[in-house]
Amino acid sequence: MRKKIVAGNWKMNKTLQEGVALAKELKEALAADAPNCDVVICTPFIHLASVAAEIEGSVIGLGAENCADKASGAYTGEVSAAMVESTGAKYVILGHSERRAYYHETPEILKEKINLALENNLKVIFCIGEVLEEREEGRQNDVVKAQLEGSLFDLTAEQYKNIILAYEPVWAIGTGKTATADQAEEMHAFIRSVIAEKFGNEAAEETSILYGGSCKPGNAKEIFAKANVDGGLIGGAALKVADFKGIIDAWK
Ligand code: PGA
């Protein structure tokens, strides 16, 4: 059975001290009331080592929000997949729409990042999703399929096992406008069919596909109840333990 996952994406929020405090509060909340799913928090690079120490021995998994498309060397300001892994992190978000849009990350760049992440034993939370105009024109399936093909289709079956997918319609991210549970289910089923065509039915059935975009305690249960939705990638609501825990509890 594929894993149910609730992953937080802190984005560029929280100082180091605030981040460690948030991780501690989450650890304590989950120690008092164990989750029914895998829980991951993805933090800014500079938080990783400290948060790893804080959550050691807890149920929480740790991830980065990005990594470099080069292995090492003269790339001032970049952070490699090996560096991420050396902090104790086990996951990395790649292909987030904010990185595609603001930092011009192309499918080719993302391929390099994915390869390096996998070489360094990180699980990749790979984000895909259409912008509003593409949905209004009815092109969302083509867009998402091209994103999958462009960055994942050169992976071997063995490599692909370490990919988690996150469908995040860009028009729903941080806007308060969530996809309906039916819209999410329709797209997740389509994504699973694309994966089945390329990597086979078994790999498709084993793929966790998370929904992301204004997911909140109030709507998570309805969205997670859908057959092809295996959890959420949570932005804003991951910054408050009560909200994040509320979403985790949607699996209960
Ligand atoms: P949001 O962000 O939950 O704040 O909409 C989700 C994401 O971008 O991962």
Image (tube, rainbow, N blue to C red):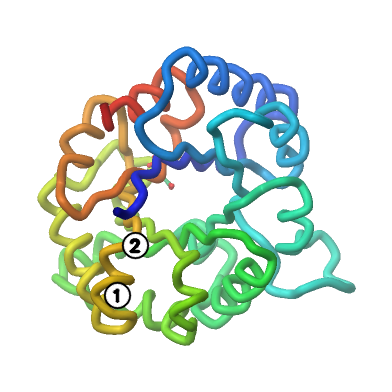
Left or right, 24 with reference to 7: right
Q: Is mark 1 on a helix, strand or loop?
A: helix
Left or right, 21 with reference to 168: right
Quadrant location of the C terminus in the rendered image: top left
- Whether residue 232 is visible, yes or no, is yes
Q: Residues within 10 Å of mark 2 (few under 14, many from 20)?
A: many
Is 105 in front, or is 191?
Answer: 191
Q: What residue sits 20% from the left and 47% below the top?
A: 179
Residue 98 in percent (x, y) is at 49, 56
In the rendered image, which residue does mark 2 sit on? 207
Which amino acid does the dot numbered 1 rest on?
A: Ile
Task: State whether label 2 is within 8 Å of ligand 1.
Answer: no
In space, the residues marked 1 and 2 are separated at their CA atoms by 9 Å
Which amino acid does the dot numbered 2 rest on?
A: Thr
Q: Is mark 2 on a helix, strand or loop?
A: loop
In the rendered image, which residue does mark 1 sit on? 195
Residue 235 in percent (x, y) is at 45, 39
**Where in the image, quadrant-wise, is ligand 1 located?**
top left
Question: Circles 1 and 2: CB distance less than 8 Å?
Answer: yes
Kindly identify which numbered label has been placed on residue 3: none
Quadrant location of the N terminus in the rendered image: bottom left
82 over 175 or under it: above or below:
below
Q: Mark 1 or mark 2, which has the lower sequence index?
A: 1
Q: What residue sits 15% from the left and 46% below the top?
A: 226
